[in-house]
Image (cartoon, grey):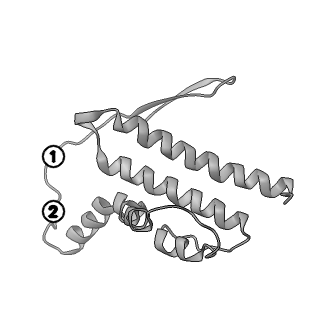
Amino acid sequence: MTVPPEMLRVLRQWVEKAEHDLINAEHTLKLKKNCPFDTVCFHAQQCAEKYLKALLFFCSIEFPPKHNLRILMQLIPAEVALGLDSKAVIGLTRYAVDARVMPHQLSIQLLESGRYPNPPNVAFSFTFTATFTFTGLKTCSLTF
């Protein structure tokens, strides 16, 4: 089967993004005792999602812009043998984006409950600096 160049380019993008999530999960696991396992699971979920979406795209199957791995796996044709533990893959769904924004949702619920009408008298500040190095290009730093 000959894959059209444009399709091949998109497939490579899906796989590259999946690989980046896998690298991130593997790297974070090296933290051992201080490892934020929810972050590892998030990247594992994202990796699986992107690989599944790459496969669906390759099979010319439309898929919803959702993070539910069960839905994505159900769309894969029966004749495609993945050799995966589907329960384990589907279990990663709970670590998708929704779990990452849970503190935000809880904050809104608490504020909307009316139980905290006045903000506490607390000073809060933070600084975040990120440095990005692009191979063969330049390094840039962002401070927030």
Q: Is residue 23 above or below residue 99?
A: above
Residue 139 located left or right of residue 41: right
The one nearer the camera, 127 or 98, is: 98
**Count of number-bearing discs:** 2
106 lies above or below 13: below
Q: CA distance from mark 1 to mark 2?
A: 12 Å
* Coordinates of residue 138 in the picture (x, y in percent): 64, 23
Q: Quadrant of residue 119?
A: bottom left
Q: Does 28 appear above or below 89? A: above
Q: Secondary structure at mark 2?
A: loop
Res. 70 visible in picture:
yes
Task: Residue at 49%, 61% (x, y): give it.
Answer: 84
Tell me residue 66's x, y (percent).
52, 70
| Residue closer to the observer: 32 or 143 | 32
- Quarter of the image with the N terminus in it: bottom right
Q: Is residue 9 above or below residue 133?
A: below
Q: Give the image location of residue 125, x and y in percent.
A: 27, 39
Q: Residue 81 falls in which quadrant of the image?
A: bottom right
Mark 2 residue crowding within 10 angstroms, few (<14) / some (14–19) / many (20+): few
| In the image: residue 122, left or right of residue 89 | left
Foreground pick, 74 / 50: 74
Decide if residue 68 is in sight here. no
Q: Are marks 1 and 2 in contact (CB under 8 Å)?
A: no
Q: What kind of residue is marked 1?
A: Val
Element on which disc 1 rests: loop
In the rendered structure, the answer to whether residue 94 lies left or right of residue 124 reads right
Q: Residue at x 54, y 42 (%)?
A: 20
Give amino acid for label 2.
Asn
Q: Which mark is residue 118?
A: 2
Q: Quadrant of the C terminus?
A: top left
Q: Position of residue 132 (x, y in %)?
A: 54, 29
Say the numbered circle drawn on residue 122: 1
